[in-house]
Amino acid sequence: MAIRYKWLAGQLEALIQKSIREGGDKLPTEQELCARYQLSRQTVRMALKVLEEKGLIEKRRGSGSYITGRSPVPQENVIGVLLFNDQDYIYPGTLKDIQLTLAQGGFSTLFFPTGNSVSKERQILEGLVEAPPRGLIVEGSKSALPNPNLDLYRKLDRKGCAVCFLYNHYPAAAGPLFVQDDNRSGSLLLVQHLAAQGHQRIGGIFKADDLQGHERYQGFIEALRDLSLPFFEDQVSWYGSRDLHKLTALKDASFLREIVLDSLSSCTAVVCYNDILAYHLVNVLLQDGYRLPRDMAVTAFDNTYLSNSDILTITTLSHRPHEMGTRAASTLLKKIKGLPVHSQEVPWHLNLKESTGA
C-alpha cells in the first residue's frame, strides 16, 4: 500500500496541473478515485493526505478536495507585483492589501517598481520570463499608448504565469484579465454633482498617457452630453507623465498655470484626473487670486490624504477601504486555482467636501 499511495499521489499531482490548465478547481471524489484507479479508499485517503500536506489541495468537510493552485516547492509560490512605486499616494495601502490576501492563499510577493516606465517594465519582464512566478499583478505603464511588451506577457502566459492587471490594462492584449476603476461612471458622478449646484461651464484635466485618463474623459464628455451642458474642446486639457514629474519632483507648476489661463478662464468648475493634480491646481488657483470654491469648484478622483489638506478639502471619489488590492489578489488566486474569473470595474463613491461648497 505504501508504494501505491505514493504512486497515486504522483498521478493526482499531474491531474491537478491538468485541471488548472483546463479550468477545474476540484478533484474527483474519493469514491470516484477508488473506481478510476482500482484502489482502496484507505490508499486514496493516504494519497490525498500527501497532497494536503504539500499544500496542493484543501479538504472541505462534506464537499471534497479543492485545488489550491500552489506548487509543492514553497520557493515557487511567488507572485510578482508591478506597480508604479510603493511609497506615496495610493500605493502603500494597495500593496499591503495585495500581500495580505496572497499570504492567506499561501503565496509570497516580490515587488517591482516600474515608475510608469515602459522600458523599465520590459527590463523587469525579461528577468521574469527566465524564471516565471506563479502569477503577476500589474499596473500597466503608460497604458493608453501602444505597448511593446505584449510579447513578453504572451511568453509568460505560455509558461503558466497568470496575470491580472490592476487600475488599467492594455487594450491590445488578448483578453486581458483586470480589476480597474469604473472611470466613466466616476466622471458622471462628479459632473452630475457640479451640474446640480448650477455649474454650466465645467472644465476637465486628464492624463494623456494612462488609460484611466481616456476613460475619465469619455465619461466626462458623455455626462455633459446627457445633461445637455455645453461642451467646447478648449475647456479640456491634457498632461503626461513628464508634466507630472516636473510638478511633483521639481515643483514646476507652469503647465497648470497655462491650463488655468487657457482652458479654465471661462469655467466655474473642473473635474481633475486625480487628487495629486487637484491639490496642486488648488494652490495655483489661490496664488492667481481665485476665491475657492466661489470662483472655481474643484473635484477629483481617489480620495487620498491630498484631498484633505489644511488649505482646502477636495470633493473626490473613493472605493471602499482595501477594495482594489484585495479584489486584484483574490481574482488572481482564483485564476491560479483554475476557477472561473472575469474582469471587473469597481464603482466609485462620492465624498463631498469644501471644494464644491459642501
Image (spheres, rainbow, N blue to C red):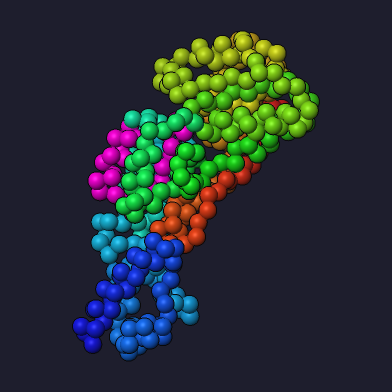
Query: Is 36 placed left or right of 169 in the picture?
Result: left
135 or 202: nearer the eye?
135
Q: Where's residue 185, x and y in %?
A: 65, 39
Q: In the rendered image, which quarter is residue 47 located in?
A: bottom left
328 or 197: nearer the eye?
328
Taking the magenta stretch, the answer to whether it contains residue 236 is: no
The residue under the point 62% across, 11% down is 262
107 or 66: nearer the eye?
66
Q: Where's residue 147, x and y in %?
A: 41, 33
The residue under the point 46% across, 29% down is 145
Q: In the rendered image, which quarter is residue 298 located in?
A: top right
Q: Where's residue 232, x and y in %?
A: 69, 18
The residue under the point 23% across, 87% down is 1
Give the magenta range. Answer: 120-143
Whether residue 117 appears in this view of the structure is yes
Query: Compared with residue 173, is residue 190 higher up or lower down, i.e. above or below?
Result: above
Query: Compared with residue 28, is residue 164 higher up or lower down, i.e. above or below?
Result: above
